[in-house]
Amino acid sequence: MMKFNRQSFGPLARKDVVVPRSVPSYSRDNYITNYLEATAATGRLSLFAMDQYFEHLFEDFYGEDHDDTSMRHLFDIAVNAHVGVIATQLGPLVRFAGVNEDYGRVPTLVKLTSRTNYRGGEPYSAVLDPVEAVLEARSEGLNIVGVGLTVYPGSEYEDQMYHEARQIIREAHEGGLITVVWCYPRGQAVIDKAKKWMGEAGVALPEKFGAREAEKHPKVALTAAAVLTVLSPDFGKINPCHPSQLGLADPADVGADERALGEAVEMARPVGIICAGGSKAEPDKFLAQLRRQLDIAKTSGNATGRNIHQHNLEDAVRLADAIAAVTLADATVEQAVAIFEGKAEFPSKA
């Protein structure tokens, strides 16, 4: 018996939602409804990144303590946990919703562009479906509240991705959908820039310095914020910077990474910044990081994949509940850990 349950935790009323002028008057009510549904009336996203099934392929979907090689595992988590919204491509959504109607009732952000991790070289995220197809699926009863897409600033294909992003955002807003852009500066140009910045700061480069290391630089986060400001989705997903891991901040200074991240968050406003969850970490450490991102950097939520789905169903549901409790119900780290450990219930709205 599935226990899918939705609650609105936030203080936001319909009159409080700031509607961009790209949303026409005839779609205004739908946009407000979708925004409140996606954020549980908090203005924050607690997003379960199921789009990783295509992006990361099987390497991230099989392990000693989990076996989620079937996407059914991800949908089962979504309907049993208190996730705010899921992100998945349109194909699996319409297919699995035909298998189980509950799968189509979860608030969903349809990821319109994707790429696999097989392709090397300069990254490009291809358009899989048009906004029109998403609106058609929504008209058939699927609980689609928005669309998402990925851009890679610095890639030799960035111009094409920017053009496609603006077109998707315009069409989605016209249809009353919210929009989220995954914004990851990548490519050799970004690596070269980060190396230059490291040199200017007088910090020695680590032995290995590639795309993943470059993304930890605070100025790369600022780059993502600038791009998101111009593309102007409702939310932008970025990888949080980690200057402490590059020798740019004292590792003993808890909160240094989040203060640097906060500069990017402030720069991007009114676009809300949400952070990628990253590789699987110990639940207590992950929840503490999430709490710091919300409190210090003032982020607008998180998009978590591996830290949820790389668990068996029971543990995955409890951790998704704990993440949502922090993000949507402002639970403390201690309260969230207790939820994950099965020692506390998911908080009810006061």
Image (cartoon, grey):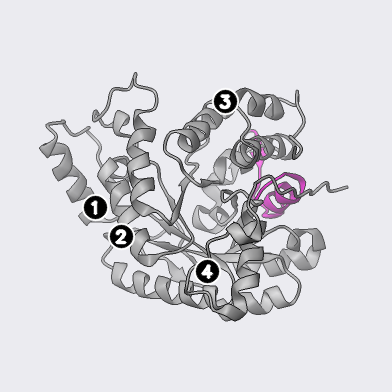
Nearest the viewer among 111 and 56 is: 111
Secondary structure under the numbered disc 3 in the rendered image: helix
CA distance separating discs 3 and 1 = 32 Å
Q: Residue 197, how many percent across, how many down?
A: 16, 42
User: Mark 1 sits on what residue?
Assistant: 190
As drawn, the label of residue 284 is 3
Label 1 or label 2, whichever comes before in sequence order? 2
Asked if the residues shown at circle 1 and circle 2 are in contact, with their CB atoms under 8 angstroms apart, the answer is: yes
Kind of residue indicated by mark 3:
Asp
**Residue carrying label 4:** 112
Q: Give the distance between the C-alpha atoms of the residues marked 3 and 4, in whole angstroms.
A: 33 Å
Q: CA distance from mark 2 to mark 3?
A: 32 Å
Quadrant of the rendering where the C terminus is positioned: top right
Q: Is residue 215 magenta?
A: no
Residue 324, position as x, y percentages in the image: 64, 41
Amino acid type indicated by mark 2: Pro
Quadrant assignment, res 145? bottom right
